[in-house]
Amino acid sequence: EPEVTQTPSHQVTQMGQEVILRCVPISNHLYFYWYRQILGQKVEFLVSFYNNEISEKSEIFDDQFSVERPDGSNFTLKIRSTKLEDSAMYFCASSWRERREPQHFGDGTRLSIL
Amino acid sequence: DAKTTQPPSMDCAEGRAANLPCNHSTISGNEYVYWYRQIHSQGPQYIIHGLKNNETNEMASLIITEDRKSSTLILPHATLRDTAVYYCIVRAPDYGGSQGNLIFGKGTKLSVKP
C-alpha cells in the first residue's frame, strides 16, 4: 500500500540553525500538509499546500517557516532559525484529488533543538 | 478547538469488540466524521470516515446516529496492537481556497488488555 515517507526520522540541530524536513507524499495525491506535535500535546495543523502554493496556514506557521515542492515528488518544510520551542514531531500528510478524501500521514520527523 | 467530545480513556479485553464513542452535537450538514488513531509516537493512521450512513472497512465499522450528533467506532475483535489514541474529527470538504485541515482533540486512549 502506498505511504507517505519522511526523512530524517530524527534531526538534532543547534538553536538558531536552519533545518529542512523532507517528505515524499503518495504519488497521485495533490494536497499536502504539515502538522506538528509537541511531546505530550495535541497534533496541530501548520500549513496546507495545493497547486504550488500555500492554501491555508495556522498562527504557528510564522515567517520562520516555509514550504516548497521543489520537484514532482518531494515536499519540504524549512525552519529558518530554529528555537527551543520548535522541538516536536513533525508530520507530513497528503490527500487525493477530492477534498473529502482522508489525509494520510507519514511517521514523522522528531526534531530536537539544543 | 475540536468540535468533538470523546472519553479520555477506555479499556477493552483482547478479542472483544471495542466501541469508542464520539459526540459531535454541533456537526454541520456537510461535515464528515473521520477517525484516526495514533500508536505510540507514530503518525496518525486513517481508519474510516462517513457522512450519514454507517460504514465498514477492513479495519473497523463506523456507526453514525440518525441525527448525526454522535458516532461510534467499532473494532470488532480488538488485539493488543490496537492499543492507541483514537481521534474522532469532523471536517467539511471545503471548496475554494481552503483545504480543510484536521483539528485534533485529545482523543480516547484505548488500552487493549490480554
Image: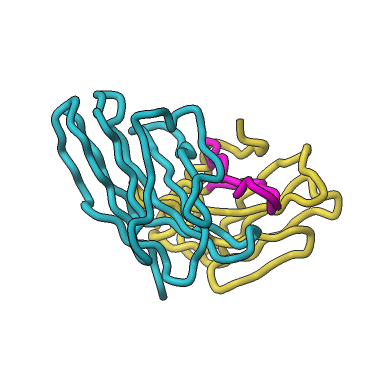
Q: Is residue B92 left or right of residue B8?
A: right
Residue placed most toward the observer, A73 or A102: A73
Residue placed most toward the observer, A79 or B77: A79
* Residue at left offset 72%, top offset 41%: B24
**Chain in cyan colour:** A
Q: Main secondary structure of the magenta part?
A: loop
Q: Report x, y in % for residue A57.
A: 51, 37
Count of marks, rendered view: 0
Residue placed most toward the observer, A33 or A102: A33
Image vertical order of residue B105 relative to residue A77, above or below: above
Indicate yes or no whether the magenta region holds residue A109.
Answer: no
**Location of residue B79 by image quarter:** bottom left
Q: Report x, y in % for residue A10.
A: 20, 46
Image vertical order of residue B114 relative to residue A83, above or below: below
* Residue at left offset 32%, top offset 41%: A89
Residue numbers of the magenta segment: B87-107
Q: Is residue A44 left or right of residue B97?
A: left
Which corner quadrant holds the N terminus of chain B?
top right
Q: Report x, y in % for residue A73.
A: 35, 65
* Residue at left offset 46%, top offset 35%: A42
Q: Is residue B78 visible?
A: yes
Q: Is residue B13 left or right of residue B40?
A: right
Which corner quadrant holds the C terminus of chain B?
bottom left
Q: Is residue B112 visible?
A: no
Q: Report x, y in % for residue B40.
A: 34, 48
Q: What is chain B's hue in the picture? A: yellow
Image vertical order of residue B1 relative to residue B79, above or below: above
**Location of residue A96 by image quarter:** bottom right
Residue placed most toward the observer, B77 or A109: A109
